[in-house]
Image (spheres, rainbow, N blue to C red):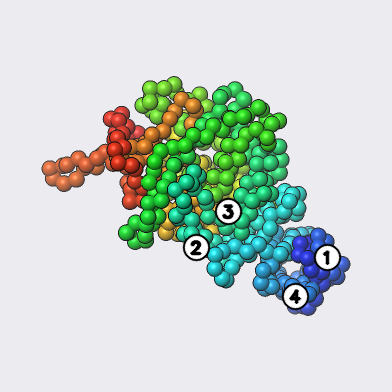
Amino acid sequence: MFQIAVTNWTNATLSFQNAKSHGGTSLAASPSSIGHGATMTVTVTIQPIGGGSGGFSLSGGNVAFAIGYGVAPNGQFALDVVSQTSGFVALVGQPEFKALPGSNVSTTLNLYQGVASGTQAPYGYVVPLAASPYTQTNNCADFANSLYGPNVRQFSLVSTKFEQPPTTEIWQPADFTGGQLTATGGVVDTLFKAMANNTGADGKILRFLANFLVPASLQGMNMWIPALRWGGMTGTSPSLPAYELRGYDLYRLSQGFQGPARWQESAPYLKIFLSLLVSGAHFVVISADADYDNQGVARSTYGSLLEAFVNSGLPQSQDPGNSHYTDVLLNVSGKYYLDIGGEWAPPGSGLMLALLFGSTVNKPYKLLTSGGYNTFLQLEGWQASVPYSKRHKTDYNAHEQSLWNFSTFGASPYSEKRGTTIFLAPPQWVPTVYSNTFMMPYVGAYPVTLVYGTPPVKVGPKPPRWFDSSVVSVQAGTPAAPAQYNVDHYT
């Protein structure tokens, strides 16, 4: 027997109608209609032998949803939203699952008035994030899954953000959520509360990050955000947005910090950090000894963020390979928070579904001491997998058309490939822009010296090969990087 808990979050009263069952299945619903916030249980009864199929509708007023199901002889059950009225969204908690003989299996089906996403018709519609998304059944997972629905991740949402006013301090992200990314009660607010109170499905991973960046025993890290100015589109194919890197703006993550009990009121820059993280910005947490030695300052006592995550006991999985800090071979140092092996957010999950930790040195991190590399941190759109994830591949293709980074919720121009890495570092480390490296060089992103021809001619030092120098510039008169940065460590 399969049970589907149908909850109505629209403003219409919906009735169970048009029930059809074939083969060895039958349908029943109780109650037969539901208003806003009410739940109906749809039961699919299966004969001991054989499979079957069927469907039903939920409709009222001008709103209608058509739902279909199929049961294979081996007990594999599939639930599908066949159609829905434009502007509304139906999300299944688990589209496919298998039941053992004689067992009862249940899933959810939540019905929502959608939030429009896009700049042009046909618009996509996403699930509204609830006021208490961790306690409203499957709301976080439904929200995340809806962000990969038809017409939601329109590239025009990104391209319209390419150019922003010269007064912009922090470049605004593209927003796939229909305005829910940074709105009051939206994604950032939800995650900040989870971080502050260590609650909800995302509380532990966010508290881990906060405790690493602003530990009780140390001063707290600084966040250095690139100061950008619009530089026009490149003449390459595809034509890419370019920016002038004018320096770095300092945000002290520990400013106003008075301990865990007061995070909500007194850690404003942690909220800025979260807003950048959820939009896909690329962060590098400086821990490599050489990066401190080159500035003549004390080495970090924080250790490696990647190592801390690996040893944290938090759920994690191996990244099969990513394109960060590499030209040809994949970087296989990455670890994801959570282990999502499919194309669907699992029931009961939170919002942080594809948080990637990795080494800036393209070797397995275990071969290095924690002082031999830096950790990069980035919320991707969806976890990479083998065979490859369609959701991950779609976002990567869009990334190549813009060199913006794509997260589950939006897209950001802060990418190491375009020289706009955001740095997280102890107070003694300070970044600077240079004419031959553009962004601040760091272990994993030091300039390289290229050798051409016979007899060999050295050219450089230049940015690493994975870096696209056509999309970044610096102001006239910017000095070159000092000689100590011309040593390419471990890459």
Judging depth in this view, the residue of 442 and 410 nearest the camera is 410
Q: CA distance from mark 1 to mark 4?
A: 14 Å
- In the image, which disc is placed on residue 409? 3
Query: Can residue 292 be seen by looking at this rendering?
Result: yes
- In the image, which disc is placed on residue 156? 2
Earlier residue among tags 3 and 2: 2
Judging depth in this view, the residue of 150 and 453 nearest the camera is 150
Judging depth in this view, the residue of 352 and 344 nearest the camera is 352
Label 4 sits on what residue type? Answer: Asn
Q: In which image quadrant can residue 294 be found?
A: top left
Tell me the quadrant of the picture where the N terminus can be found. Answer: bottom right
Judging depth in this view, the residue of 235 and 322 nearest the camera is 235
Q: CA distance from mark 3 to mark 2?
A: 15 Å
Residue at position x 24%, y 42% in the image: 450
Could you say where residue 107 lies in the image, as x and y percent from the top left?
A: 74, 60
Earlier residue among tags 1 and 3: 1
Answer few, some or many: residues within 10 Å of disc 3's Cα (few below 14, many 20 plus, some between 14 and 19). Answer: many
Label 2 sits on what residue type? Answer: Ser
Residue at position x 54%, y 68% in the image: 120
Earlier residue among tags 4 and 3: 4
Q: Which residue is mark 1?
A: 35
SS category of the residue bearing label 1? loop
Could you say where residue 122 lies in the image, as x and y percent from the top left?
A: 57, 71
- In the image, which disc is placed on residue 62? 4
